[in-house]
Image: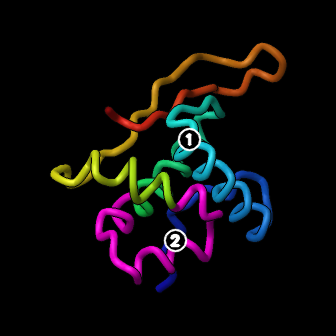
């Protein structure tokens, strides 16, 4: 029996969607706070929380795994600055705050940030 897919497609093909989420995740890690649409924020949350959980291990294997997807600058910040903050926390590393609708097209906007 086929089950329904859980992720949003974001009106993009698979490669474009992966590139978008990779870009959002890198920006969130570097800036620690980004403004985007609500749907993109909810998808980025899934990706970023998985990455932080991986970075908490801080071994060579996790560094290589993260290095395949991100630049060395992003990996360094993730492992050295972001992950140690959440060492005792089991999950919920991000927070999404709804901002209302965008003036131009009426899209629901949200602020996604790393919890301090």
Nearer-N-terminus badge (2/1): 1
Image coordinates of residue 64 in percent, x first then y, are: 50, 80
Is the residue 115 above or below the residue 61 in the image? above
Image coordinates of residue 89 in percent, x first then y, are: 19, 50
Q: Would you identify the image quadrant in which residue 104 lies?
A: top right
Judge the density around disc 2: few (<14), some (14-19), many (≥20) Cα neighbours within 10 Å. many
Check disc 1 and report the residue beneath it.
41
- Judging depth in this view, the residue of 43 and 91 nearest the camera is 91
- Residue visible at 30% across and 63% down in the picture: 56
Is the residue 61 above or below the residue 110 in the image? below
- Residue visible at 50% across and 59% down in the picture: 76
Q: Would you identify the image quadrant in which residue 14 lies?
A: bottom right
Check disc 2 and report the residue beneath it.
66
Which of labels 2 and 1 is toward the front?
A: 2
Q: Is residue 69 magenta?
A: yes
Q: Secondary structure at mark 2?
A: helix
Q: Quadrant of the C terminus?
A: top left
Image coordinates of residue 43 in percent, x first then y, are: 55, 51
- Residue visible at 65% across and 34% down in the picture: 37
State the mark number for residue 71: none
Q: Is residue 102 magenta?
A: no
In the image, farthest residue toward the top:
103
Count of all numbered marks drawn on residues in the image? 2
Judge the density around disc 1: few (<14), some (14-19), many (≥20) Cα neighbours within 10 Å. many
Calculate the distance from the C-alpha at mark 2 to the C-alpha at mark 1.
21 Å
**Colour scheme:** rainbow
Is the residue 106 above or below the residue 47 in the image? above
User: Which residues are the magenta region?
Assistant: 52-75
Predominant secondary structure in magenta?
helix
Asked whether the residues under the numbered discs 2 and 1 touch, taking CB atoms below 8 Å apart as contact, a structural biologist would say: no
- Residue visible at 47% across and 48% down in the picture: 45
Q: Secondary structure at mark 1?
A: helix
């Amino acid at each position: 029996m086929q089950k329904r897919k859980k992720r949003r497609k974001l009106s993009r093909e698979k490669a474009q969607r992966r590139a978008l989420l990779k870009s959002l995740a890198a920006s969130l890690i570097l800036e620690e706070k980004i403004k985007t649409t609500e749907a993109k924020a909810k998808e980025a949350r899934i990706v970023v929380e998985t990455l932080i959980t991986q970075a908490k291990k801080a071994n060579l294997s996790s560094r290589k795994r993260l290095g395949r997807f991100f630049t060395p600058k992003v990996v360094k910040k993730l492992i050295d600055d972001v992950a140690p903050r959440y060492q005792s926390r089991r999950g919920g590393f991000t927070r999404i705050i709804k901002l209302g609708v965008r003036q131009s097209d009426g899209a629901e906007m949200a602020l996604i940030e790393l919890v301090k």
